Each structure stands twice: as C-alpha cells, then as structure tokens.
Image: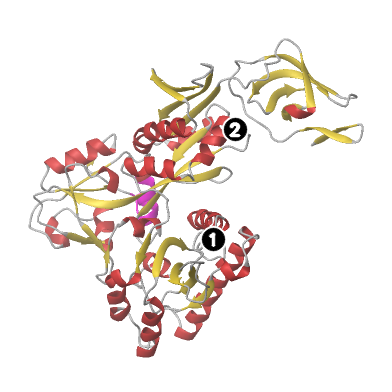
Amino acid sequence: MRFFACGAAVITALSVFGAGSRALAQDVTLIARGGGLELSGTLQAFDGEFYRILSAYGPLTVDAQGVICDGPGCPGLTAPRAVIRIAGEGDPGGRILPGLIRAFADFRRLTLEVGGDATRLTDPTTGQLLAEFSFIAMPVDQAVPLLEAGQADLVIAAETPDGLGSRTLALDALVPIVAADNPVAEVSSANLARVLAGEVSNWSDIGGPDMPLVLHALPPDSGLQKALGVRLGRDVKAAEVHPDLTALAAAVARDPWAIAVTGKSSIGAAKAITLTDKCGFPLLPTSLAVKAEDYPLALPIHLLTPKRRLPLMAREFLEFLSYPQAQAAIAKSGYVDRLPERLPMTLDGLRLINAIQGAGAETTLDDLKTLVDAMDGADRLSLTFRFEDGSSTLDAASRDNLADLALLLEAGMFKDEALVLAGFSDGSGAAEANLDLSQERAEAVAKALRDAAPTVPADRLPQVMAFGEALPMACDETATGRRLNRRVELWLRPDFTKDPAPGN
C-alpha cells in the first residue's frame, strides 16, 4: 500500500509486523513532508530508517525520510537500541553465537559487553548502546510461533518451515559414534537405519561382537533428531535420551556398547565410525563433502527470519554472515563454515575409484577417459548444485551457493581460470538419456547464474559439460544415493587463452 501527496510517494507501507517490544509505545503523528497527509498511531519501534506504528489502518512500517514525526513518542534522529532476540536450537546457538557476535562487534569497531542474559554493543566514541543480543534455547516448534508473533527476531533451526525466510548459518555432519574401545570401525547406512529404528539389539547383527547394543539419542523434538529421522525415513527409537549433544557424547564414551548419531562438531570423547552406503562406498564427512552436500547426512544450520522488517542492526548482522570474518568465527566454533573450498581433482582418488567400480554396462572406457581428461589439472570448488526432488528448482543450499558464486564473479575472482559447470546424473535409466539430463541440469544452473550476475561478461561465465552417470558419488540402489549422484559441480581450470599480465 502506498500513500501519495503532491504527486510524490512520501509514505510506503512495507510490511505487517507482529507484537514486539512496547518500549516505544507512545502516540505519534507522521506528517508527509509534502503536506496533505497524516498518519496517527502508537509508535512500536524505530530503527533509524523506519517507523513502525499501530494505526487505524493496522500495523504499518513507514519510511522515516518521507515524514515528519510529531508527538510525545517521537524518537531522536539517532536510532535507539536494537533488541535482537534469537531463539532455537541450543547446541549450535550456544556454541556459534558468542564468537559470531564478538566478530561482528570487532568488524563494526564496537565495544562488546556480556552481562546477564544479553550481549551489548556500544559505540566506543559516544558510549551509546546500539544493540542488545540475547539467545534462548528452545525447540524450534516453540521458537517459530514467537518469531511469527514478533517476540523473537531470528530462530536457529535445522529445518526451514514454509512461510519464513532463511539464511544458512553454518554446516555440520551427522556421524555415528561409539566408545573409543568399541571394535566396530564402520556401519552401512542401511544398518544404521535399522539401529535407529530399534530393529537391532545386538552388535553381531551389524557385523560386530556378540554384545548388547544400546542406542542413545536426543529428545524427539530436537532439531538434530528430527533432521535425522527425515534423512533416514524412520523415527528414532532410543533406549537412552539425553538433553544435549555434550551429554549424549559423554554417555556414549562411557559405554563400550553404546551407539548414537551426533554432529561432527560434538563428538567429544567418543569415536566416530565410518558410514558406508549399500554398495560399500565410504561416505566421508570432510569439510568439502559437507559443503558440497556429497555427504548424505550433511546438516545445514539455518537462521530463520520473519516476514516483517528487522531492525537495521539485525539486517547488518545478517549481511555480516557472508564476510570471511564471520565464517572464521563459525569455523572456530567447531562447525563447518560456508567459505568456498577447493581441492585438486588429482587428490580425490576415491571418486575415481567409485567411477570405475560403479561404472554400469553402458559406461564405456572412452567415457571414463573423457572424464579423466576433463578432470586432469582441474580443481573442484565446494559450491555444488542440486535440485529439489522431482523438480528443476534449486534446493535451498544450492540457491545460497548460486548467490555466493555470483558475488565471487562480480568481485573479479577466477580471472585467470576457466570455469566449468559439470553435470552428472544417477544411473537409473538409459545412459544416453542420463547424459541429456545432466546436460539440462548444468545448463539450468548456467542460466540461473547469468540471471544472478548480469554484469559479469559472458566470457567469464562457466562453460557447461555433461558426463551423465560416469562419476557416481554413492550407490544408485537407494534414493539417497541417487540424489547424491544427481548434481552439478563447479570445476576450475587454468585458462591459457588469457593474455599474461604486463611484466610477466
């Protein structure tokens, strides 16, 4: 809804907002600078850019540049303290936020003070209190209603409910853990699913010694437990339940016949064992595999955002997440950051082994040679693209990756390298049709990138190559394996067509 006066738009109602802080709840009148229009109501908040008022038209957000504020509730020109209330998953919130907020304060050259339940940021020159961050750990299904009602500003979650915005905060990997003296070194994803479903009570059923198996887990309403159930398609039925990841790892470490699934960042004194797929391929949770979602139990940690406009300081905090200083703080907390990572293809021998062992009858020696020739001298970047099931729409993580790649290209990265979007398919169906599908997916990513980075010259955009089913990441006999195999990778190769810089 727009209001016009004297032919110029002076007030814009940008969003509906929920019930929030009533610290500024006083009567105000907002008068259009061009005259002829007034809005009266109760001031709910002011972030230095926008007023939020409860008016006769309902709740409105109004651009401060277009109006003059009159009345006892009018704030000064300086933005008041921004109260940024964060709720949600306790383990990532408690570990990531303290260092991340400190890095944000350092980046903004603000003074940080921790006291009580809040972290305060002040201007060191004026002493003005600019922002107050707080965090309350609670199940996501309790935190989301608070976000929608305006009683929380951000929510940390391992899931992305419909109707809310989200930013990927960090990444983790779900890994099976046992005690250090447990002799079992690996477990297949199929057997792990049976364990989590309560179908296994003895280690001998999954290749271990004849000893009782005890499953430990988090409460069913925890985000990690829900994410695990979604990925494995089964409810987790644990004999022992623990309140948090620290207690979970400690309990498993004490019991030689216990098993659990936890975040790689929270193994503690326990021992992680290797996860394999149905065909015996090892699934390793390296940082690149987690960033690229090649590891099937990669776990994105999201910051959920509301539909209403957030305070200016909260928006700047969200923007800070893309900076290297923020990613360094996330990595220091033990979680996997989102900075792009590159690896020479020649060091990834496991994938070549998978390609040879997993080659179907329709994958010829010439196909493998073509693949190896293309990989020779190339690096793989962790930015990888996958699609939502049954659609041509990039999934949430891939949309973040696309935005990151567009920013890198616009910033002039990779000037001396040729970029390749390499498309791959699963092995179900005919090889020729799979090759076509992998080509279509790679071209879809290339088009989306052109749209996301319109100022980047065409000769700096990636070329497209397709390899069909020639390089499987996992076994095609499971839905999870087929999803891992359907992907578009980003490769970097030296570009010998570019003229050398003067003096070289």
- The quadrant of the image that shows the N terminus is top right
Q: Residue at x 40, y 66 (%)?
A: 380
When asked about the image quadrant of residue 329, the answer is top left
Residue 24 appears left or right of 330: right
- The quadrant of the image that shows the C terminus is bottom left
Q: Closest to the observer: 163 or 272?
A: 272
89 versus 395 height, above or below: above
Residue type, label 2: Leu
Residue 446 appears left or right of 110: right
How far apart are the alpha carbons under marks 2 and 1?
A: 26 Å
Q: Residue at x 62, y 22 (%)?
A: 79
Q: Residues within 10 Å of mark 1 (few under 14, many from 20)?
A: many
Question: Residue 237: x and y, percent?
Answer: 28, 47
The label number, if any, that marks residue 202 in the structure image? none
Q: Is residue 326 visible to the viewer in this orientation of the structure?
A: yes
Q: Residues within 10 Å of mark 2 (few under 14, many from 20)?
A: some
Residue type, label 1: Leu
Find the magenta span and give its range: 225-235
Mark 1 lies on residue: 394
When asked about the image quadrant of residue 135, the answer is top left
410 versus 364 height, above or below: above
